[in-house]
Structure formats: structure tokens, C-alpha cells
Amino acid sequence: MSNYQSNGVIVAGLDETYAENMDACEIEAARVTNFGIFVDGSGSMLHWEDIMRDCLQHVKNAILGSKQADEIQVGITRFASQVVPGGYQPVGKMSTDYYASGRTLLYDAIVDGTPRLLNYMNEQRANGTSTQGIIVIMSDGEDVGSHNQLRDAREAIKQLLDAEVTVAYIAFGDGAHGIAEKLGVPQGNIKNVDATESELRSIFDLMSRSAISASKAAAAGNTAGGGFWNV
């Protein structure tokens, strides 16, 4: 795995191909929901490695089993001591790998991931595809070690919201409470959950159902005005 520079962030990946999106010209669906999942892979999450793999697999299976499967593309970004972005691809290609170690480059992940999504959505629109974006960020604590600052991540969140991208946040455990508010995530899209196995599994189940619901709403010409989590 090699490193490269992206938006002022040191990113880990198999060159740029690791974060490659599905070619916008090859999308057959009339509308697409780009569903980004940003997961904390820092050392404090080590205890939850196996459960996180199960949770990601559950999200994948839930979307594949839905009628919206052909209209949802998923990109997984993992952040620890490096940011490891994943491109937006059909859900069948979604990786459920998960490993935990190192620091928490939360701000860097947000700053790097914002233009990746917005630029890709512009490509989709240019090719005649109706598109929407969703980013769900999951973390168990404060940023540790990012090149970027809180103000940079907050500005990136604002760019997403101004572009009508849905941004939601899972604060896993007491140490994560209050961070989403500082980042400017809408209050109705923030979920504070206890650091337990049952809560972790429950929130990933809700996340999958919420993404499917948002895709259905877009197909019907509606928006999730009541908040991402209100399924």
C-alpha cells in the first residue's frame, strides 16, 4: 500500500486506483444515491473489530436485498493514522474489511472525502444521471493527529450541506458526544449511542434502513426533510 497527497492530507491507498469510482458513463440507473460511510479505525476501536466487520456486512446485505440496490453506490472511508478512501461503487463491491490501530484522523477524512464526493456527483450529472449524496461519519472520540483543523472540517461539512448532501453522525460512546455539533452536522442527523455491542449493531441496522429510505424518497421526488435517521 502506497501513500499519496490529496487535499493536504496524506492518504493511504493502492495509488489512486484504491479510491476509484464507478465510471459515471457506465451508470445505467436514471438516479443514484452515493452513500459514503466514514468509519473510525483508531486503536480505541480495537475491541470492536469483529463486530464492525459484521455491521458492515449487515449494511451490505441489507442494501443488496432491497429494491434500491441498483440505485445505491457505496464508498467506505476508513480513518486511523492514515485516511484510506474507497471509491463509490455498486454495493456488491463494498468491502467489509475492518481493522483498528493508531490515531484518529477525523478532520483529514472529512476534508479529503468532501471534494471526492462532490466532484463525482458533478460527473454523474454531466452524464445525465440524477444524483444525491449521503455521508455518515462514525467515530468514538476526538480527532487525534490530523493535518487539518476543526475549522477546515467544519467548512467541508458546510460545503456538503450547501450542495444538499445529507451529512449524519454516529457518536459511539461518551467520548464522542459533542463533536458532531462542533463540526456543524445538523442536530437531527446526530445519533449519540452507548459503546455497547447491541447499540453498535442497532445503529448500523438503522443506518442501512435510513440509506434505503433516502434512496426511495429521491426516486419519489421527495427529500429527507425530517432528518436522516427518521425512517
Image (cartoon, rainbow, N blue to C red):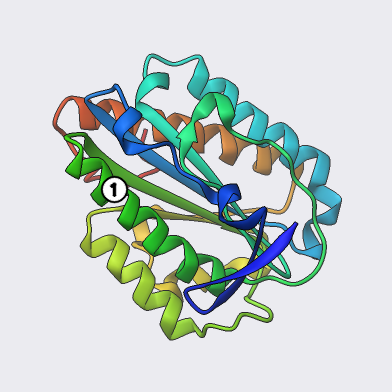
Between 6 and 185, the one nearer to me in the picture: 6
Q: Where residue 215 appears, x then y in whole percent?
A: 31, 30
Q: Residue at x 67, y 53 (%)?
A: 14
Q: Residue at x 59, y 21 (%)?
A: 61
Q: Where residue 165 appears, x then y in whole percent?
A: 29, 53
In this picture, residue 34 sits left or right of residue 144: left
- In the image, is residue 44 above or below residue 64? below
Q: Residue furthest left?
A: 221
Q: Residue at x 56, y 32 (%)?
A: 205
- Where, by quadrant of the figure, is residue 3 drawn? bottom right
- Pointer 1: residues within 10 angstroms few (<14), some, or many (20+)? many
Between 224 and 157, the one nearer to me in the picture: 157
Q: Where residue 158 appears, x then y in whole percent?
A: 30, 70
Q: Quadrant of the N terminus?
A: bottom right
Q: Residue furthest right?
A: 47
Between 8 and 220, the one nearer to me in the picture: 8
Q: Is residue 168 visible in this depiction of the protein?
A: yes
- In the image, is residue 227 above or below residue 72? below
Q: Is residue 171 visible in this depiction of the protein?
A: no
Between 28 and 220, the one nearer to me in the picture: 28
In this picture, residue 86 sits left or right of residue 140: left
- Identity, as a three-letter code, of the amino acid under mark 1: Met
- Where, by quadrant of the figure, is residue 59 drawn? top right
Q: Where residue 34 appears, x then y in whole percent?
A: 38, 41
Q: Secondary structure at mark 1?
A: helix
Residue identifier under label 1: 121
